[in-house]
Amino acid sequence: MEKCNLIFTWIFIVEMGIKLLATGPKKYCMESMNIIDGSVVLLSFVELSMTTGGDDSQISASPFRTIRILRTLRVLRVVRILRALKSMGVIIAVFRRSFRSFIYIASLLLICCFIFTLLGKTIFGAKFDYIPRPRGNFDTFTIAFITVF
């Protein structure tokens, strides 16, 4: 994990440097996502520089380890791209509208599984004495539910 952290930190540093050279510092700071990316990269660089020393520096850099969570904010860039595509917006709207129907269908499936589990447990529960006992049996409710599912 430490090697992956080091590799990705350097990749992000190079990306930030190239973007700064391409757009310039003034235009780079105009976009809010660049500011978030830049601050995460700078904090990662500070963490990297503090943890490259001995064991004492790793203890003092432990608060920086919680900042690694901020790297997940870089994923928000994908959301910005998805908003720009109109066809993707239509697909997301369809998913949003069909989600309520999916919940109803899933709950109906769960009720059917529950009913057939009770039915199977009543009819087949502890009726068969096979040695060894098969995995899919109806002796307990949990195993019966998994068997029906």
Image: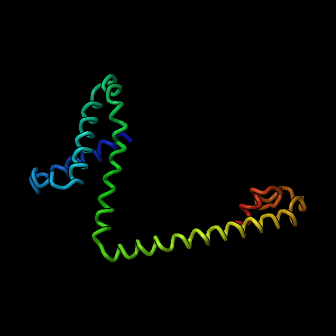
Q: Is residue 89 above or below residue 74?
A: below
Looking at the rendered image, the quarter that the C terminus falls into is: bottom right
Q: Nearer the viewer, residue 129 or 106?
A: 106
Q: Residue furthest top?
A: 56
What colour scheme governs how the chains and residues are painted in the rendered image of this protein? rainbow
Q: Write the residue at 41% across / 73% down.
A: 93
Quadrant of the snapshot with the N terminus: top left
State the image quarter where residue 137 is shown. Answer: bottom right
Judging depth in this view, the residue of 27 and 141 nearest the camera is 27
Toward which corner of the image does residue 83 lie, by quadrant?
A: bottom left
Q: Is residue 97 left or right of residue 14?
A: right
Residue at the (72%, 67%) spot, across then down: 113
Q: Which sits in the foreground, 45 or 96?
A: 96
Write down the quadrant of residue 122 in the picture.
bottom right
Q: Residue at x 32, y 62 (%)?
A: 78
The number of callouts visible is 0
Q: Residue 27: x percent and y percent? A: 11, 55
Compared to residue 66, the image places residue 73 above or below, namely below
Horizontal and vertical percent for residue 89?
35, 73
Q: Position of residue 134 (x, y in %)?
A: 79, 59
Residue 110, compared with residue 67, is above or below; it is: below
Of 4 and 15, nearer the camera is 15
Q: Is residue 73 left or right of residue 111?
A: left
Q: Estimate the x, y position of residue 140 in percent, counting from the top left.
A: 80, 55
